[in-house]
Amino acid sequence: MEKILNYINGEFKNPIQNQWIDNYNPSTGEIYSLIPNSSAEDVQTAYEAAEKAFLDWSETTLQQRSAILTKIASLLTESLELLAKAETMDNGKPLSLSTSVDIPRASSNFQFFANAITQFASEAHESVGQNAFNFTLRQPIGVVGCISPWNLPLYLFTWKIAPALAAGNTVVAKPSEITPMTAYLLGDICNKAGLPKGVLNIVHGLGKTTGQAIVEHPKIKAISFTGGTATGAHIARTAAPMFKKLSLELGGKNPNLIFADCDYDKMLETTLKSSFSNQGQICLCSSRIYVERPIYERFKTDFIAKTRNLKIGSPLDKETNIGALVSKAHLEKVKSYIDIAKEEGGTILCGGDYVTVENHKNGYYLQPTIIEVTDPNCRVTQEEIFGPVVTIMPFDTDDEALSLANNVRYGLSCTIWTNNLNRSMLLSKRIQSGIVWINTWMMRDLRTPFGGIKDSGIGREGGFEALRFFTEPKNICIQY
Ligand code: NAD
């Protein structure tokens, strides 16, 4: 059986303690490769390689760094077909999605930061009347840790690694143990692109062993983490006493506010995507839909009809809209929320059951599910389900829509559908979330700050925010 290996100091290595985890193909339920469950010793080896490489990498010119990152970006694009298939096999997402979104975005992440680093400047302040100048260097931190989740595997892994490397750091990174394959393939691409040995090290394994060893390592001075809120809290507890820099991109329970004056057709098409893309397993998916009462019944009918039309099937099939959920455990978790909804008095308007796909009978498939709720405090509207399950509920006034939107512990993103400019401005200002989309969803400009408030995390990724996170400012004051 194929073995995924650690990528340390530019070489592929077995885990020192020779411990392995099974890697499943969610579309068939079969084990198809083995993943190292790396120990603290492996993390230490990766750290040592990164520490050594830092001396030279942090002194490379911006042009050199930019050229290598650009090369990685183009090699990712050249390997689109291979990587997209690998992502789909590992994650269960439709091949159409990994081909059009995941892999192109991984390439864009490298290209974006290859460009951005050439425009990232130090600041200067003249202390007028005191005969002094200040200038503020932005220096790389050293060895940094990047830990990513399974939902957008290579996309989110590279979203951290690219700015970390561009800023002159060296990296010890861990992808999710549930979807390690494309991170494994990235190692070879980095070698081909001429990334010096030890600049990027990829260590595979469970969160509680490998991830924990990265977070606990006293000399890894910054941790960029994307994943669940409970894991983020645990990481914060571990890292805070060591004064590590922390960027935490955590869970969400995003509202979709639909007003009667919206562009109805565009809203309906986009709401289908914001609800069920990637089987609802995108942190930005809008899982709480609130609809202004005059169009509630019409929306309900149309949304149910469109959802029923979505084709659930093998992720490799071109026609498939809904692939497999990422793991059996996750499938069971998502399904359990449908049962909770029934107990709580919710009405299942559509879906709600497992699906058996021809020739893939052990795969992890679930119908896209719409639940009508009456209590905004019930568990299905409060807790992150992270699957193809949305709730819908009517509202009457702007204030009610706002208070429903803000009525959760999370604050990642929000979508508002209205053609009323004043309303969209007022709501945007008062919504508790890091990202607001008006009359669109998941439109990304990589220069903009990305991240959440409340229990959705701390810090922002994207653009210069990411380069600021991965550097330490040092102010130098000179009097003349
Ligand atoms: P998770 O928290 O279980 O795992 C994320 C990563 O952390 C994995 O690599 C895991 O191995 C590692 N990990 C687990 N325990 C650890 C520990 N003690 N120390 C160090 N690392 C540890 O999350 P998941 O199930 O992989 O991903 C789904 C979650 O990610 C959802 O909550 C989703 O909302 C969130 N997410 C957030 C964003 C965002 O940008 N805010 C984006 C995507 C996903």
Image (tube, grey):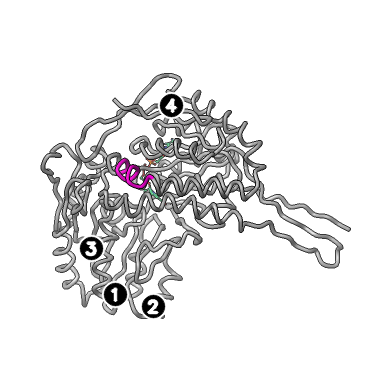
Mark nearest the camera among 1 and 4 is 4
Ligand 1 image position (quadrant): top left
Label at residue 423: 2
Quarter of the image where the C terminus is located: bottom right
Judging depth in this view, the residue of 315 and 133 nearest the camera is 315
Q: Which residues are magenta?
A: 79-87
Category of crowding for the residue at label 1, using alpha-carbon neighbours closer than 10 angstroms: few (below 14), some (14–19), many (at least 20): many
- Quick one: SS at disc 1? loop
Dot 1 and dot 3 residues touching (CB under 8 Å)? no
**Residue at the farthest right position:** 480
Judging depth in this view, the residue of 191 and 97 nearest the camera is 191
Q: CA distance from mark 1 to mark 3?
A: 13 Å
Label at residue 38: 4
Q: Is residue 228 visible?
A: no
Q: Earlier in the sequence, mark 4 or mark 2?
A: 4
* Residue kind at label 4, given as amino acid type: Ser
Where does the image place residue 69, in percent across and percent down from the top left?
Answer: 52, 47
Judging depth in this view, the residue of 76 and 291 nearest the camera is 76
Q: Which residue is mark 3?
A: 392
* Residue kind at label 3, given as amino acid type: Ile
Q: Is mark 4 within 8 Å of ligand 1?
A: no
Q: CA distance from mark 1 to mark 4?
A: 50 Å
Q: Is residue 28 visible?
A: yes
Q: Is residue 275 above or below residue 145?
A: below
- Quick one: SS at disc 3? strand
